Amino acid sequence: MKKILLLSLIFCLFSTVIAKPVRFKFGICDYSPVLKEFNTKNGIYRLNGRLDLLNLSSRLGLGTAMNISFKSDNHDVDYYNNYDFYVHNLYGNKSREGKYIIYGLTAGMRITKVKTVSPDYYDKVTYTFSSFLLGAMVSRNDWGLEIVCSQNEENNLKLDFATKYQFSHSYYLEAAYCYIGPVKEIEEDFSITFGMEFFSN
């Protein structure tokens, strides 16, 4: 796992030198396993990062996205991490005024790690599993929408919806929701992320 992450990082850094359009996002996320129980005092705090290299070959490019937990105030879930690796056909364009639009499809894999309380074992259990990843997105300098299809630990389809509002140059606020969690012990997904997004043409 660590070797895959290291090789991906090296490749992405090397590709950044030759890639033309590049999209980079990072932020801090407050995640809740249940929407109705969302509370900043009971959340899981994650670092969110994403890098998309566009037009490496025609319109095809590479991308990676990571959500890594660094603090949990939730009694049931210690951490919830996911690592995405994908190819995409994202198209990006930027005007002279600095306005931009990026849109397209993604396809790849998602690796998920969750540590949560399990009633079956009367203790906390760590899940590690991988699944396919399919997505569609549009991102502008003022708003964005993304839909991602993957699977949870029981191989059920998992549709994640995320919408962002961008303000004050590169800062954005994003809300994401899924009606099903990554493992059976987590009912649903809800998160709010605050961060920055950059697009270089």
Image: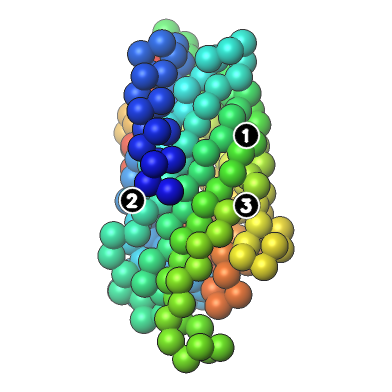
Which badge, 3 or 2, comes first in the chain's sequence?
2
Q: Which residue is mark 1?
A: 106
Q: Position of residue 23 (x, y in %)?
A: 43, 26
**Disc 3 residue crowd, few under 14, some 14–19, many 20+, Cα 10 Å:** some
**Disc 1 residue crowd, few under 14, some 14–19, many 20+, Cα 10 Å:** many
Q: Nearer the viewer, residue 87 or 201?
A: 87
Q: Which residue is mark 2?
A: 47
Which badge, 3 or 1, comes first in the chain's sequence?
1
Q: Residue at x 59, y 44 (%)?
A: 109
Q: Position of residue 86 (x, y in %)?
A: 56, 35
Q: Nearer the viewer, residue 60 or 200?
A: 60
Q: As shown in the figure, which amino acid type bears the numbered disc 1?
A: Thr
Q: Position of residue 98 (x, y in %)?
A: 40, 16
**Secondary structure of the residue carrying numbered label 1:** strand
Residue 179 falls in image quadrant = bottom right
Is the residue under label 2 in contact with that under label 3 (CB below 8 Å)?
Answer: no
User: Extreme front residue here?
Assistant: 3
Distance, label 3 to label 2, CA atoms, is: 21 Å
Q: Which residue is mark 3?
A: 131
Distance, label 2 to label 1, CA atoms, is: 21 Å
Is 117 above or below relative to 20? below
Which badge, 2 or 1, comes first in the chain's sequence?
2
